[in-house]
Structure formats: structure tokens, C-alpha cells
Image (cartoon, rainbow, N blue to C red):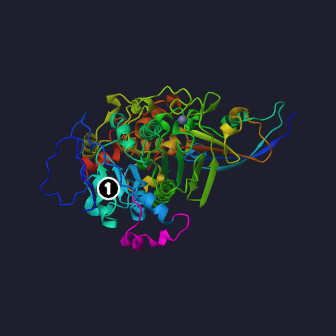
Amino acid sequence: MAAPVSLQVEFGGGAELLFDGVKKHQVTLPCQPEPWDIRSLLKWIKQNLLKERPELFIQGESVRPGILVLINEADWELMGELDYKLQDQDNVLFISTLHGG
Amino acid sequence: CPCVRVPVAAAVPVSPRSRPCPCVRVPAAPAEGALGFPAELPPLPARSALSAAEILRYSRQLVLPELGVRGQLRLARSSVLVVGCGGLGCPLAQYLAAAGVGRLGLVDHDVVETSNLQRQVLHGEARRGRPKARSAAAALRRLNSAVQYVPYRAALRPRSALRLVRQYDIVADCSDNVPTRYLVSDACVLAGKPLVSGSALRLEGQLVVYNYRGGPCYRCLFPEPPPPDTVTNCADGGVLGVVTGIIGCMQALEVLKIASGMGSSFNRHMLMFDALEGRFRNIKLRPRKADCAVCGDRPSITCLQDYEAFCGSSATDKCRSLRLLPGGDRISVQQYKELLDARAPHVLLDVRPQVEVDICRLQHALHIPLRKLEDKDEESLQRLQKRIGEEKRRTDDQTSVPVYVVCKLGNDSQKAVKILQELPAEEFGSVLAKDIKGGLMAWATKIDPTFPQY
Ligand SMILES: [Zn+2]
């Protein structure tokens, strides 16, 4: 049984608009048999934080193209992407890329 | 005249109004298919010393040991292609010109509009309606006449982009749309040029240096384009001029560091700026991806493509016109004006966000933001029903009361009509909803010229 995990989940670049405009969320993930990873965090976000239009944030089991995931201020690609095992007090930032100028 | 004369690809009739020192004049792309770009630019001459006038002019930066005479001479021999002369391109070009870069290529197909002036600080009121590339060149020439300016009054196109990018040392992406960002990045990979990319929206900005010293390209980070309906432009989302200014200046700084030999700090790093929190964050990015389609070990993209098709959107930041409803569910602003003049019973429903209603509104409209309709907000739906009921009573239940839905441009209003049409009839009765094509901006241009445009 994995212990509960406390995270700071942040949204930026406009992704926060899918979450009532709130950029910072203090999140406690409950105990579950498997350790929490980004894949299961995305499912949790879809069920608990994201109420409307999930297709603007999630595609399949990952984030939609154009959203960059940063774990403790580093590109998730360096950390194992969906398989990264979340640690207590991690910071996970979902940033929508901007195109305006 | 310190400017170079460049042979122009097509014969250009010289306008009698053009001044004697026009630098490199580039004709506007006359028609689809013609390349509005000059033939090869001559290389900037290598120089071994600064003149006394240059020493005086650049003295405050020459005494910086990180730059020095060596850096300044490198700067003077560097050419920079600025893609987009808008909110990012204006401050970028301004600081690079002031610092004494050798040559600035200025690409923009657009003309200066009133709503640009809040952030595109090289263009003045008197320049409205003029091509941005030339307006920028004129303003920069007043600032530093020793720099060569090459305005290109055309959009960067897959056909011509590579030839253009090859003629410059560094590229700055100051564009405003997704297809252009992929085009610029691919062209930089194929031409082997570093790309200093900036973007801004609302109160946030981002900066990355791509394709530099073995680092990633744009496609390494974003192999797939975002779905078109998740992309917001500056007209819809808004942007603060200071934010584009800060990111444009940061881009200028990185260009200057690369050109002068200091090297960039944002290779494999993204700078994220949140103006509301006053926070800069420096994010460590992935290295170049071995399986990247363009910069990878076995690239599948070896020439430039159709980026509008790839992204499913057009290479401008102009607002799109959606067509979600059949013609019978829509009326024109002229038809609505006739209904209004005939005092036909109806409810006008404005579905814009509150912040836009505060800018301007039609006084008789009921206001429920689209977001509330999407959430099926009970209080909002009750207000709508109450208003329909009042209107019915006013006409002694003689007629049905249609709901005409309006927004800024006629996109959100169609979404709202769909929602209203799908409300359960047993609960809400049947709501006859239609949308007003072109929205309040069509109202302003076709019916009431005193109505504000934004
Ligand atoms: Zn790449």
C-alpha cells in the first residue's frame, strides 16, 4: 500500500482556464495499492479537478499535444514521462505553450 | 548612404515618391506565386577595427569585458532575420538596431492597425494602414542609420523560407501563429541556424533557444501540433504590451549574446514569465531527440512542407470563423436590425465574458456568459426563462419568442445556440434560438458605426 502523496499541481499558459482559472492546487492523493505515477495522476485530475471538456487537456492516457509537463521544474521527458513515480512534495506543472506575439 | 544596394529578383518600378536613400527596397509579393524576396544579399564585410564614431556610440557596452571591441565587431558582422514585426519583433529589432547589429531582415505581411499600437511600439499613429515591415524599418533607421534593414512585406512561406533563412546568421521567431512556428523551426534546422523563439499571451511569456549547440528543435519539444481549437490568439485572449516587450527584449538579449560570442543561456532551457506573479522560471528541457522528424538521426522531413495543412490552421493570428450551425439557424445583423425596428418580440442573449461586456454592449441584451451555459448553470437558465416569459406576456402570448444569441464575432454564439437547442424540452420548453452572424463586430461595421470595435 502506497502512502498518500501531497503534491503541488500547477497549470499555466492558459491551461488554468480549464480549472476555473486557478493556477496552483495543493493536492493530496489517497492511499492506493500501486505507487502514484504521472499516468495515474492524470486520471485523478480528470476525475477530480477537470470538470468540463477533458479533451482540451487529455488525449488518450497522456496530455494533449501542446501541453508541456514539468516535474520539479524539469521537462518530464527527462524523468520518465508517464511512468515517473511521484514523490511526496513534488511539484508538477502543466504548461500550455503560447503562440502569440 | 551606408546601405547596400541589392539586386532585386524581379524588376521593380521605382516609385517617384521613394526617397533617395531607400536601403534595400523589397517589393511586396505582387501575387501568389511570385517571390517577394530579393536575390542573395552580399555578406557583411569582416572588419578589424571600429571607427571613432562607433566607439563613441557604443562606448557604454564596449567597456563591458564580456562584450568589448571583439564582441562589437562580431555584432557588426551579424545578420538577424526577424520573423514578425509585432509585439515581440518591435522591441527585439529596436534593441538590436541600437546595439549595432550588422543587418536586420524584417518579415511581416501585415499592415499596422490601431489595435497594434498598444504593444507594437515601433509603429506610430501615422503609420496605420502601412506595411509593418516598412514601418519598422523606417523607425529603426531613425534610431541607427548604420544598420542595414531589409524589409520583406510578405508572409514567410515554405517555398521561400529556406532561401531567406540561409542568408542570415540568427533567426528570431516573433510570429503569432502555430504553422509559422513549425515553418521557422524546420527552416532553421535545414539551414543550420540558431532560433531564438519568443511568445506571449495574456500575462505570460515564454522563450526558448532552439537548434543551438546540439540542443533540441521546436519539433523535439512539440512533435505534434496542438488541436486548432485549443490555440488562443492575442485578439481573443488579450495580451499586455509590457509582457511582449519583456519577452522581445529577452529575445534581443539572447540574439546579442549568440552574435557577440557570449553564448545563450537558454539552450535546452525554457524561460517562463508570469507577469501577475512577477515570476521568472527557468525550466530544464530535454536534449535533441534522436527520433525527431527533422533534426533527428534519420529525419523524415528533408524539405519544407505545407504547415497550414499539418497544423489544421492558417498562418495568421486572425480570428477564425466557425460554421457550426445550418444557415436557417442564423440571421444577419441587417435582419436583426429589421426585427428590432419592427419591435418584433424576442430576447437578445449576449454570451461574451463579463470583461468584454464591460467594454461595450447593446443595452437591451440579457447577459449570460457562454461558460455558464456550458456548465448548465441553473441560476442563469432561470434568468433566461424569466426573460422569455416576460417577453411572452408583453405580447399577450400571441407569438413564440425567439432567442437571438450574439457574441463578439459569431463563433461563441453558435456554440451557445447549440447548447440552447439541446436543453431538455420537458424542463425548459422549446427554445427557438438563432445566432447573429458576425456578432457585435459585424453590428459595428454594418449597422452602427459608433459602436466600439475591439
Ligand atoms: Zn528536433
Q: Chain of mark 1?
A: B
Q: Residue at x 34, y 60 (%)?
A: B147
- Depicted B142 relative to depicted A14: above or below: below
| Front position in the image: B437 or A6 | A6
The quadrant where residue B436 appears: top left
Q: Which residue is mark 1?
A: B149
Residue B48 appears left or right of B341: right
Examine the rendering and report whether any part of residue A39 can be seen.
no
Q: Which residues are magenta?
A: B47-67
Q: Residue at x 44, y 42 (%)?
A: B389
Residue B285 appears left or right of B365: right
The quadrant where residue B416 appears: top left
> Would you say residue A37 sits in the magenta stretch?
no
> Would you say residue B48 sits in the magenta stretch?
yes
| Front position in the image: B339 or A18 | A18
Q: Residue at x 30, y 45 (%)?
A: B442
Examine the rendering and report whether any part of residue B252 can be seen.
yes
Residue B53 appears left or right of B202: left
